[in-house]
């Protein structure tokens, strides 16, 4: 990933360790009155992030984290998902369209219905990993890809 992909956010001081990864779940009701909430809540809900650096500047008070928060630099991790084989071209831009599939016990379900994605999310395919390991129960031809926003 490029330097420009770095995002500055705030995280609890007990969690602020370079290399730590987390899934951003969104804000809470206690965040609403906080003047720093825009910095904390600028991440994409459901996306996974890795802390790459801790910024100097000290600890800030927080309504959620009892030990306060500090500024960190994070990178959004690529999202692994299954898409139609015809669309799996490295560098192409796609708009997420969840497949019409209700076979929740399928071994591919977690890749096809990727967690944290919403219809209309825009991505760039950064890597075509390969074919889905098990055949699709709906008979679709799928590839596993890594994408970034």
Image: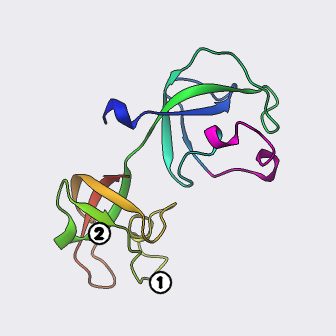
Which quadrant of the figure has residue 55? top right
Which residue does the image show at 63% across and 45% down from the upper left? Answer: 41
Nearest to the observer: residue 128 or residue 29: 29
Q: In the picture, residue 34 is in which quadrant?
A: top right
Q: Residue furthest front?
A: 35
In the image, what residue occupies the spot 26% across and 81% down?
140
Residue 85: assigned label: none
* Residue annotated with mark 1: 102
In the image, is residue 2 part of the stretch drawn in magenta? no
Q: How busy is the neighbourhood of tag 2: few (under 14 within 10 Å), some, or many (20 plus)?
A: many
Secondary structure state at the residue bearing disc 2:
strand
Q: Position of residue 130 (x, y in %)?
A: 20, 58
Between 87 and 93, which is closer to the camera in this rendering? Answer: 93
Q: In the drawing, does residue 63 fall left or right of residue 108?
A: right
Residue at coordinates 81% horizontally, 45% vertically from top-left?
Answer: 33
- The residues colored magenta run 25-39
Query: Quadrant where the N terminus lies?
Result: top left
x and y, in percent, of residue 110 in the image: 44, 65
Horizontal side of 85 relative to 17 (left or right) equals left
Q: Is residue 89 above or below residue 106?
A: above
- Report, in whole angstroms, how far the alpha carbon at label 1 lies from the one at label 2: 16 Å
Closest to the observer: 145 or 123?
123
Please give the residue where the numbered disc 2 appears in the rendered image: 83
> Nearer the N terminus, badge 1 or badge 2?
2
Residue name at image x 20 percent, y 69 percent? 87
Disc 1 on helix, strand or loop? loop
Q: Main secondary structure of the magenta part?
A: loop
Q: Is residue 29 left or right of residue 141?
A: right
């Amino acid at each position: 990933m490029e330097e420009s992909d770095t995002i500055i956010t705030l995280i609890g001081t007990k969690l602020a360790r370079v290399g730590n990864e987390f899934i951003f779940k969104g804000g809470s009701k206690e965040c609403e009155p906080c003047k720093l909430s825009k910095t904390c809540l600028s991440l994409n809900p459901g996306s996974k992030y890795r802390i790459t650096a801790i910024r100097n500047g000290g600890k800030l008070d927080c309504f959620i984290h009892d030990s306060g928060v500090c500024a960190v630099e994070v990178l959004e991790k690529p999202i692994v998902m299954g898409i139609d084989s015809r669309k799996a071209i490295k560098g192409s831009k796609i708009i997420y369209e969840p497949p019409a599939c209700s076979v929740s016990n399928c071994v591919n379900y977690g890749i096809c219905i990727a967690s944290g994605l919403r219809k209309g999310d825009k991505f760039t395919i950064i890597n075509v990993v390969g074919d889905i390991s098990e055949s699709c129960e709906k008979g679709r031809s799928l590839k596993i890809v890594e994408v970034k926003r």
